[in-house]
Amino acid sequence: VMGCPMLFAIASSLCAAASASLLPSSGPRLRSLSPRVRAAPLMQAAGAELTLERWLSDCGASESLSEVVLALGGACMDVAERVRTASCDSYSCFNEHHSDERMSGVAIDLVAEQLMVDALRGTGCVAAVSTPLDPLGCLDPAGQYSEDVDLVQQRQRRERLSGSVPAAVPADLGVLSASVDPLHGSSIIDTNFAVGSLFGVWRAPSLLNVTGESLLAAGACTYGPRTTLAVALAGSDGVAEFLLVPGDRAGGGGARWLLANRYTSLGEGALFAPGNLRAVTEHPGYASLIAYWHENRYQLRYTGGMVSDVMQLIVKGKGVFSMPAAPGRPPPARLLHEALPLAFLAEKCGGASSDGRSSLLRVPVERLDQRTQLAVGSAKEVARFDEMVGPAALAVETE
């Protein structure tokens, strides 16, 4: 090159252009945001950060609700660390590399449940909590474990076991109850697929007979390449997405949730995530629905982790997730722990949800282990699910 002036000039020009492209410009270079998230505050300098705590305050959340959501957010931070450091084989995952010896060798889903329940116990304002592993588990208002908290919960426990439905709980009591799915998708952690946690919070002394329409808050934490927490509140539009940012070792600051996006629309788009796909062999309606999506060249995006499979719809702003029941078989999704939080998030974005008949948010929780069909996504796709799949009339519930 040095022996040829023309080639040297060309090479110098190319090197200069490449160097210029690597140098920072006078201001931050940000990707162009889509209209649906363009108004969302972006993470900037430390002084402009909007934390989960500040966001709850700005939204007018009550002190007790803020306390519960922050406690669950803190527990999700701990679960994220346990998932990241889990030891797995082809059958299960355990927490072996952690300083807490009590958790050593314990299955990761049990560790996650303990972290979530302990966090709720510490708030002192949660009357009852239910998890998939312990649907009947409960806490008293002082935050202590109790087999029979008080006469009201003793009566509700007897009614639950006998199959009867108690009267609606009074809505003016100042106690909160929470449903938590501490680690949904724990069976795919060994493959490094994204998994997640779900929660819902109600103002009620019991979770029996509540509906999604009375939710105060719902959230979904996704443990993937990024750890994010999506939260929606009653009385506020949209879903806020917070990013888990590690602590500043030099400054001594701890890990924190920072607002990264706010999603306000879930519209039409050719994207589908078909859960319980084996049901197509027994359910002609579901087989026809899957065929429709294929014939119309919809994009298939499904991992088997319900939290990330539904959250992708909110992030992308389009599509549908489906999980029907096969005829004569129990519905696959847990109403209290899975369906209601996800339906609340989807509908807060302007999307829809259904059990094959109507919005999931209208379905009362008559049993803490109640199961349901599930479709969430854009309004037209959920309506298509209702038309082609319909109610789970032939499904049978089991204990």
Image (cartoon, rainbow, N blue to C red):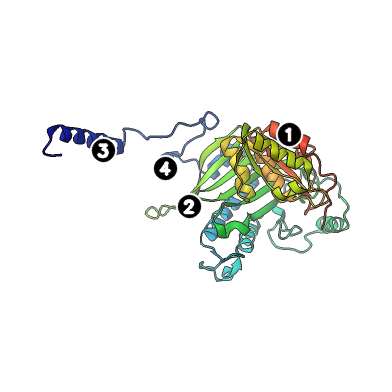
Tally the numbered discs.
4
User: Residue type at mark 2?
Assistant: Ala
What residue did someone put label 4 on?
46
Is residue 396 found left or right of 347 in the rendered image? right
What residue did someone put label 1 on?
384
Picture coordinates of residue 181, whole percent (x, y) = 67, 54
Residue appearing at x 74%, y 63% in the figure? 146
Q: Are marks 3 and 2 in contact (CB under 8 Å)?
A: no
Disc number placed over residue 255 in the picture, else none: 2
Q: Nearer the viewer, residue 346 or 168?
A: 346
* Helix, strand or loop at mark 4: helix
Q: Are marks 3 and 4 in contact (CB under 8 Å)?
A: no
Disc number placed over residue 19 in the picture, else none: 3
Q: Earlier in the sequence, mark 3 or mark 4?
A: 3
* Helix, strand or loop at mark 2: loop
User: Residue type at mark 1?
Assistant: Arg
Residue appearing at x 77%, y 36% in the figure? 388
Is residue 146 found left or right of 302 in the rendered image? right
